[in-house]
Every structure is written in C-alpha cells, then in structure tokens.
Amino acid sequence: MACLILSTHVTAGSHLTLMSSGLTPQASELNIIHALNHSTLPLKKTLNELYQLRDYKLIWSDGKKYNDNAKQLLLSIQTATQFGLNPFDYDAELIHSFLAATSIDENLLSKSDVVFSHAYVKLASHINQGKLKDTQTLFNQDKTLLTALNNAADTNSIRTAISELQPKHTPYKNLVKALEFYKKLNIADETIKLTERSYELGDRSSEIPKIRQRLFQLGDLSSDDLNSDLFDESLMVGVSHFQIRHGLQADGILGRQTVRELNIPIWQRIQQLELNLARAQSLPDISTGKHLLVNIPAYKLYLYNNQQLSYESNVVVGKKKHKTPVISSELTKIILSPYWNVPRSITKNEIIPELQKDPHYLSKNNMRLISTKPQQSRFIDPHSIDWSNLDTSDLDFRVRQEPGKDNSLGNIKFIFPNHHSVYLHDTPARNLFALPRRAFSHGCIRLEDPFGLAETLLSSSTGWSKYDLLNITKQSKSRTLPLEQPIPIHLTYMTAWADDQGIINFRPDIYNQDSQVLASLYNADL
C-alpha cells in the first residue's frame, strides 16, 4: 500500500520500470524517481537512462552517508582545470558543501544523488568530447559511454573512468601539457617597448634585458646571461624561435609585430590554449590509422599514420570573405589533369565582368561555356552572348576551365565529399607559398607539394612515384585514380597547438572565431 501511495508522486513509467525488474522499491529509490521527474536539470533524459541502468539505486551514498564515489567526483571536478574546464560548471561549491555537511538527512542524500550524477555525466562528456558538442546528443549516440559511467560507479573507479575518457590522440595530449606549462608561468604584465623602430644584431638598449627575461621564461632563449643589454647572436636565435612558433617571418629582428605578440598577456594565452583544447577534444578519434589534418590558421596540411607524422605541406586557405570550412570527410580519389568547373558565384562576380571588358577572356584562359539546358548543344559559343546586357540571375550555362599548365587547379586535385564543394588541389600561383600568411583562395586548399602527397597516398598500392604522376599529367587528359582505402580528412581551426617536440605555437585568429568558442566555453548550461 505504501508503494502505491508513493507512486502517485512519480510518473507511472519510471515506477513500473522499477517494479518490472522484480524488485521492491526502497524509499531512497522512490525519492530519486521523484527528484528526476521534478528536475529542471539540462541532462534530465540522460540521468533517467543512467538510473534506469542501475534500477534507481543510489550512486554517491549508501543511504546514510556519502561514499568514496562522491569524494572521487569532487576531486575530479576540482582538477578539471587541467583539461581546460571550469569547476564552476560542475557545481563544485554545491557538491563540496554537501560533502562538508555535519548532519545528513537521508531524504537529502537521495535528492543530492541526482545533482552529483548530473555533474558526473556533464564532466565526463566534456572531457571526452569537449564543450563544443551537444552533451545530450553525445549520450543519445553513445550508449556505451553511459554504461561505462554506470560500471565505474559500481566498481568505485569514478576518477579513473573520467581520466580515461580523455581523447587518445597526440594533438589533444600535447595541448594539455602546453596548458599546464602556461599556467605555471609567472610573467608580470609589464610591457616591452621599442625606443627604435626595431632591435637587431649589435643593438644595445635598456629594454633588451627585459626581452631576454621574457624569451627565457617562454622557453625561446637558453642563454644564462639575462642581464646583457646587447642584442647578440643568441638573442637573435631566441627571437627567431619565438617568431617561428607565432607564425611570423623568422628574420631574428625584434620589430613591432614581434613585440605585439610578446606583449600578449599570459592569461590571454591561457584562454587561447583552453579554447583550442576544446577544439581538439571535439576532433574525431585520430589515434589509429591514417588521417589527413589541415590546420587553417597554420596554413599547414599533415598526414599522420598511427599518430606518426609521415608528410606535411604548406597550404593556401580561403580568404576571410571565402572561409575554408571546418569539416570532416574521407578522401576518396585523386584526379590528374583536372577540369575546373567554376563555381557559379565566381562566374557571376568575376568571370562575367571580365568578359564584359574582354570578349576573348575565355579563350585566353582556356575556358569553355557548357550549357545547362538539356535540349541545347553542350558547348556554347561565347561570342553568341551579349555579355553587356546579360541577366545573371538565371544563367543557363556554366564555365569550365580545361586541363593544362594554367588551370587554376594546377595538375592535380584530391576529392573528399562535402556539401561545401571544397577540395585539395595544385596551383600555378607558386609565389604565395613564400608568404607567412596565406589566406587567398575561394575556400579550397591549395597544396605546395601536391605530387608529394599523391605519391605518399598511392605508392603503397600502385608503386607510382611523383615523377610517374607528373608524366601522366603532361598528356593534358583528365584521369581519375580512386584510393584503395578512403582516408579520413579533417579541416580544423586551431589557433594554438603544441607539436611532438613540445613547441607551443600560436597563430592569429584569421576568421575571428575564437571569441565565439570562448562564449561557448563560459556557458555553464552546456
């Protein structure tokens, strides 16, 4: 009778689920059901699933006092800063106050159990996938994760389970170490000033000892003589090292741009590392097999094989107006001597205005007009069109550039399906790769050494070298080479990272996306 009376305070579904297990509900279990049904916590659905796995039994106490699971959880929350997370987001103070209470009401233990569990699943999801992915969606897609959390509760291994949920790949692990390094730095906010336009080898200045101290603390200078006011060779090497890892021209000269980077406060660098740690957490698992990574702000492409770097290349990415998207896909084929099917936006905004000035523009650039009307001849004579009075709102043709040495895609492109219609490709504009900042494309990624990448991807299955591939392109006839196995490719946006040697790199936020990520990280309701 008591159970029937109590069940009027809970939903029939939860109560019947418990009864159907053949168990007689205890007061603590019914209190949990009641707390769940009246909860306004964001992860209510996930909490219901967790407690259903364990027939609504308590996790964080034995019904009389808090257990070791609860202490492990609080310690995990308090040390979450090492993963770039804020303990405040996981009710650290509230949980601490529960554990510190001198007298504990049994009814309160049941209610607080739900609060502890909410912090538990939220922290676990953020360590596993980061705060940039929706936590509820994660648990909807990964039931094994919830089972693992339940098993950890049963085996008194909460802290170990949470730690083991970290991503396994090296970009994430290296960033954790970088964040730890920067949090230990004790650098004053005193700024470095230039009394001249720049300092270089042989100069003397009262600012130079301060520069030496700063570079030594950041790990760029190994000199023991930190008080010298002379800009000597060791300082020039230190400045060059700093410039390289900040994406500046490594000329060893301390100019305004280098000083500007030196003067960025450490707290701001810590924020930058934390938000990029969240980006690394949200990456797919790249710990095994082959993976291609493009880091857009670094203007770099990397090929990893079981986390070992086997190839890298400078790249050109999209300009701010035509951003290269952040996506994951699979590289499926390589096309030699490709056609370039010009996007409609480029046709309207760039090619048609050129044709209005020069009716021979297409022939000069090895381009043809292709009809999009089913009943019309495939190729259209460009001289049959009045370009000056053309209505561009409804074009019935597209522009195609033929294979050849002046093709905008160069001699090779790499295809990975995506709805942005971006791909990797060669380019005749080789001069751009000498620049430190290379955001010039319409969104696709141009490769400095595309045939080196093709050789790396194909040699194991075809035996072809880059020179074999280059010889094929001399025929100026398009040819498609499917990959034996698709290779995952990830276009990423990392403005801070650490390499395998532990060198910490920072890059400008070329698309102004860091502030959006910071806003997400500081949203405690995620």
Image (spheres, helix red, strand yellow):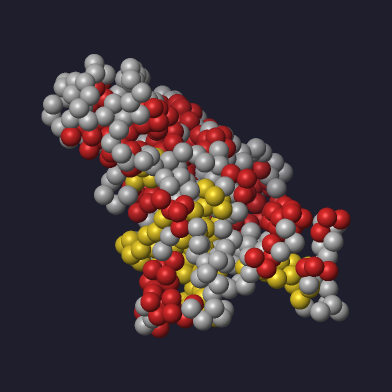
Q: Quadrant of the C terminus?
A: top right
Name which residue lies at 30% across and 33% down. 253
Q: Quadrant of residue 177?
A: top left
Name which residue lies at 35% across and 54% down. 170
Side (left or right) of 469 relative to 369: left
Looking at the image, which residue sits at the far left?
224
Q: Nearer the viewer, residue 324 or 519?
A: 324
Residue 472 seen in render: yes
Name which residue lies at 46% across and 45% down. 437
| Location of residue 60 in the rendering, given as x and y in whole percent from the top left corner | 45, 41
Side (left or right) of 94 relative to 198: right
Task: Please tell me whether residue 190 is drawn above or below residue 127 in the rendered image.
Answer: above
Q: Nearer the viewer, residue 87 or 368?
A: 368
Q: How many marks?
A: 0
Looking at the image, which residue sits at the far bottom?
462
Residue 29 seen in render: no
Name which residue lies at 39% across and 74% down. 466
Q: Nearer the viewer, residue 240 or 367?
A: 367
| Location of residue 399 in the rendering, given as x and y in whole percent from the top left corner | 71, 66
Task: Please tell me whether residue 227 is drawn above or below residue 363 in the rendered image.
Answer: above
Q: Nearer the viewer, residue 373 or 500?
A: 373
